[in-house]
């Protein structure tokens, strides 16, 4: 009965989503009627004179029609008051459904079709638990669960927005959830039964049988859902014509939280693919990797835009538009991963009919949001203006460049799919993305370095050049050092290393001549996040410029060289794991002629359920890089294929990602603390 209880929880949650949406619509309409001024005889309804007169003659109107207006107002208040508890209960029911799905996976209940197709009784407990979302239906249920919990959190925690805007936001959130509930209940039921019951399951994809499965999808989905919340805030503000600093301050923690989790998810996913797939790369420009990168690019632009609106009352239209674009990209990613139109190690193999369902949802949500944006953007005031040479100007330039990169990635990802629909088979790979997006990204980094050194509203160009002298000197010294040591490398990695040094120097500019103990926490967050970008960029450029690769057919006892390391194959031995068997190589390694010997043990694993062979890399991490080793197949002549890489400073890529997320977390904590203090002062001082 566990599966049936889970399905019932889903149905009840969907019913509450319908009720939440309907009550939000009715409450907002009644509220708009209650506050709408009555027409004055002889004057047009939209006249400014009429609005002033009606506001000043409220008592007379109350005598004539006040009873009806009062009843409407009370009714609107009561209806809107019911939306919050409904959103809270809906989130709890979604959480219950997810918990029950995890339960049937942990218990290996093979009478549930999803368990039989994606689990096995011999799997370790961790993969039974995480396997609940290591498939199409389970991952969609995880998505809608986080979505429901986010709606519940808004209902409980948000108290600063005007009630109509908050209720409109919860209504938009319910509309998003309703589409995914319909998708699960009518197209991808995670609790469907199987008869007859098989003796055991087909097993989980071996590439997913890694601890990364336990945290990578949840972090990404929290990021995606955080973007959906920002989208709901934008829709709510457009519906109630309330786009302003208060709306931005309410939305900013959600955008920042989503951006943090997207950063963590992408960083963790990059390292997971790096060591699990055995290809030696950290980013493959795979369509599914791009599906997570595109929302991050849009969320990065949105984060800067919403901060300007919250603190400086600028970029109002930009903020709303970017909220729509960011959510659009998360929906596009969902479609790409689950539509069945992609061939990828990351994608779920799904019936294309389900992809059509998701495509319909994408068209409804994004088309509706764009239509609402077009209809209401005329009601959004411009906000405060600023000069081109200012921090706001730099942020607008950053947003434009981020949008260009987003467009490049989107076109490169979708173009092969569109071409295939016309019978043309082609692929767009790393050469295109690197050449097209690389120069734009470097220009973005250069402007990012100048941003913290600019003043708000307006600045002087000559003074900016003076403040930029230290970052420029750091970039020049780094470039000169690379040229002297290496004799020259490719232009993009060279510029990447130089700009990384300049950005690192510029990142700490907000701390110059300040009392560090009194520096706000969100300022520290900005510094650390920008510094993380510099560290990641240095790692990317170094890995691209200095990586050494050796592919050999090795006999036992033969030494081989890769970078500064000597590698010797000592032997091959069988190994048995929990639900796999493997051939394991013993590699004796030392650095240079006088280094100490150490051992790495890469494996070639075989999984019986489902039958799959995987390469398990063995990696040695040192301060200046990683030695990456992979065992291949025998050649029938007593030799074994070995792939060896020396990757200088590659760990900077993920260290930088961690710093970016840490900076975001510090900024989030600092902003929330400041908002709470401000609210307390308004309420009690």
Image: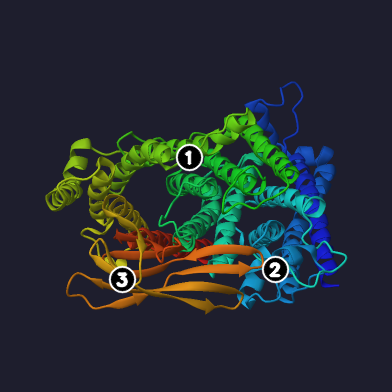
Left or right: 269 with respect to 663? right
Residue 321 coordinates in the image, percent (x, y): 54, 38
Disc nearest the viewer among 3 and 1: 3
Residue 556 coordinates in the image, percent (x, y): 35, 71
Q: Quadrant of the N terminus?
A: bottom right
Left or right: 87 with respect to 186? left
Of residue 204 and residue 249, the one placed in the foreground of this image is: 204
Name the residue: 14% across, 50% down: 477
Of residue 515 and residue 324, the one placed in the foreground of this image is: 324
Disc 3 marks which residue? Answer: 568
Q: Which residue lies furthest to the top in this view?
A: 42
Disc 2 crowd rating (10 Å Cα; few below 14, some 14-19, many 20+) is many
Is 604 drawn above or below residue 509 in the view shown? Answer: below
- Does label 3 or label 2 sit earlier along the sequence? 2
Is 538 drawn above or below residue 590 in the view shown? Answer: above
> In the drawing, what numbered circle is on residue 119?
2
Residue 190 coordinates in the image, percent (x, y): 77, 60
Disc 1 marks which residue? Answer: 409
Of residue 181 and residue 49, the one placed in the foreground of this image is: 181
Left or right: 530 with respect to 420? left
- Does label 3 or label 1 sit earlier along the sequence? 1
Disc nearest the viewer among 1 and 2: 2
Q: What element carries label 3?
A: strand
Disc 3 crowd rating (10 Å Cα; few below 14, some 14-19, many 20+) is many
> In the drawing, what numbered circle is on residue 120?
none
Q: Distance between the residues labelled 3 and 2?
A: 39 Å
Disc 1 crowd rating (10 Å Cα; few below 14, some 14-19, many 20+) is many
Q: Distance between the residues labelled 3 and 1?
A: 42 Å
Q: Is mark 1 on a helix, strand or loop?
A: helix
Residue 677 coordinates in the image, percent (x, y): 47, 65
């Amino acid at each position: 009965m566990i599966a049936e209880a889970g399905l019932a929880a889903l149905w009840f949650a969907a019913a509450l989503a319908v009720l939440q949406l309907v009550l939000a619509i009715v409450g907002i309409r009644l509220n708009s009627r209650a506050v709408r001024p009555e027409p004055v005889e002889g004057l047009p309804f939209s006249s400014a004179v009429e609005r002033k007169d009606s506001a000043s003659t409220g008592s007379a109107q109350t005598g004539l029609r006040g009873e009806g207006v009062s009843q409407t107002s009370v009714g609107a208040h009561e209806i809107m008051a019911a939306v919050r508890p409904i959103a809270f209960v809906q989130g709890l029911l979604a959480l219950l459904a997810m918990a029950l799905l995890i339960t049937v996976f942990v218990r290996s209940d093979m009478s549930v079709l999803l368990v039989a197709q994606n689990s096995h009784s011999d799997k370790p407990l961790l993969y039974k638990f995480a396997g609940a979302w290591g498939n199409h239906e389970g991952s969609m249920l995880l998505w809608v669960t986080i979505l429901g919990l986010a709606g519940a959190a808004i209902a409980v925690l948000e108290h600063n927005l005007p009630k109509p805007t908050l209720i409109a936001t919860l209504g938009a959130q319910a509309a998003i959830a309703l589409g995914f509930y319909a998708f699960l209940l009518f197209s991808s039921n995670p609790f469907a039964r199987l008869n007859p019951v098989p003796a055991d399951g087909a097993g989980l994809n071996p590439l997913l049988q890694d601890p990364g499965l336990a945290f990578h999808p949840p972090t990404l989905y929290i990021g995606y859902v955080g973007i959906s919340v920002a989208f709901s805030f934008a829709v709510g503000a457009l519906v109630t014509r309330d786009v302003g600093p208060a709306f931005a301050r309410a939305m900013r923690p959600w955008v920042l939280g989503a951006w943090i989790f997207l950063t963590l998810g992408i960083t963790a996913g990059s390292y997971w693919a790096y060591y699990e797939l055995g290809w030696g790369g950290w980013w493959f420009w795979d369509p599914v990797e791009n599906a997570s990168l595109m929302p991050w690019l849009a969320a990065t632009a949105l984060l800067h835009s919403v901060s300007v609106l919250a603190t400086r009352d600028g970029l109002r239209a930009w903020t709303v538009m970017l909220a729509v674009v960011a959510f659009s990209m998360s929906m596009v990613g969902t479609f790409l991963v689950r539509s069945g139109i992609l061939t990828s190690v990351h994608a779920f193999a799904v019936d294309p009919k389900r992809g059509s369902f998701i495509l319909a949802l994408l068209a409804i949500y994004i088309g509706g949001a764009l239509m609402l944006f077009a209809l209401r953007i005329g009601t959004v005031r411009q906000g405060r203006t600023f000069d081109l040479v200012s921090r706001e100007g730099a942020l607008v330039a950053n947003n434009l460049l981020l949008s260009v990169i987003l467009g490049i990635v989107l076109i490169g990802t979708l173009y092969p799919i569109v071409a295939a629909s016309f019978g043309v088979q082609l692929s767009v790979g790393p050469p295109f993305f690197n050449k097209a997006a690389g120069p734009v990204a470097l220009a973005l980094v250069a402007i990012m370095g100048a941003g913290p050194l600019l003043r708000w509203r307006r600045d002087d160009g000559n003074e900016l050049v003076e403040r930029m002298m230290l970052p420029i000197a750091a970039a020049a010294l780094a470039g000169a050092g690379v040229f002297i040591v290496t004799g020259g490398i490719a232009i993009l990695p060279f510029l990447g290393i130089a700009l990384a040094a300049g950005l690192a120097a510029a990142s700490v500019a907000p701390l110059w001549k300040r009392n560090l103990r009194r520096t706000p926490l969100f300022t520290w967050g900005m510094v650390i996040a920008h510094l993380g970008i510099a560290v990641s960029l240095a790692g990317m450029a170094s890995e691209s410029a200095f990586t050494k690769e050796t592919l050999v057919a090795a006999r036992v006892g033969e030494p081989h060289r890769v970078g500064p390391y000597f590698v010797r194959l000592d032997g091959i031995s069988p190994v048995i794991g929990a639900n796999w068997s493997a051939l394991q190589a013993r590699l004796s390694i030392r650095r240079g002629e006088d280094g100490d010997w150490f051992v790495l043990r890469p494996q070639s694993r075989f999984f019986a359920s489902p039958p799959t062979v995987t390469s398990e890399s063995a990696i040695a991490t040192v301060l200046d890089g990683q030695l990456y080793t992979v065992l291949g197949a025998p050649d029938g002549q007593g030799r074994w294929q070995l792939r060896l890489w020396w990757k200088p400073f590659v760990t900077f890529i993920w260290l930088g990602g961690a710093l970016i997320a840490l900076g975001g977390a510090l900024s989030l904590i600092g902003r929330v603390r400041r908002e709470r203090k401000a609210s307390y002062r308004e309420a009690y001082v």
